[in-house]
Amino acid sequence: MWQHVSSAPFDRDLELAVIDDDGPHALVFPCRRILNGWMKAETKERLDVRPTHWREWPGAGKAKSGSQPPRHNSQ
């Protein structure tokens, strides 16, 4: 289940939902929250993303849920 990004923990791999020109979608790699933003969990590369939601990364060998990230209405 998707959670609001403000509640994201710092100590685990997460799947992030972002909104870009193509609409909302989930990033295809695990991320970690850091003090001033986000990084790729595997490479520790800092990311320039502004996610809206997060959920636990499914983990190795587990099938990824097909559910879509939450949609936001433009206002």
Image (tube, rainbow, N blue to C red):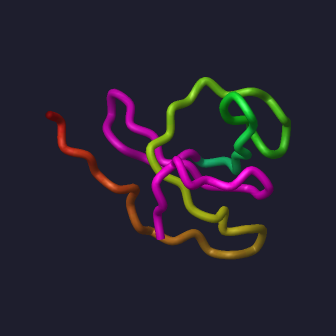
Residue 39, percent from left and from top:
73, 35
60 on left or right of 29: right
Residue 60 vertical placement versus 8 (above, below)? below
Question: Which residue lies at the image location 41% right of the left edge and 67% below the top edge?
Answer: 67
65 on left or right of 31: left
68 or 48: nearer the viewer: 48
Residue 19, percent from left and from top:
38, 37
Q: Quadrant of residue 23?
A: top left
- Give, as a single range, the part of the protein colored magenta: 1-27
Q: Quadrant of residue 14?
A: bottom right
Q: Quarter of the image containing the C terminus?
A: top left
Residue at the left extreme?
Answer: 75
33 or 24: nearer the viewer: 33
15 on left or right of 72: right
The mark tally for this picture is 0
64 or 31: nearer the viewer: 31
Residue 73 vertical placement versus 37 (above, below)? below
Residue at the bottom extreme?
Answer: 62
Residue 60, percent from left and from top:
78, 68
Question: Which residue lies at the image location 70% right of the left edge and 46% below the top edge?
Answer: 31
The reply to whether the magenta stretch includes residue 11 is yes
Residue at the top extreme?
Answer: 48
Question: Which residue lies at the image location 57% right of the left edge and 62% below the top edge?
Answer: 55
Q: Quadrant of residue 58?
A: bottom right
The reply to whether the magenta stretch includes residue 21 is yes
73 on left or right of 3: left
Residue 49, percent from left and from top:
56, 30
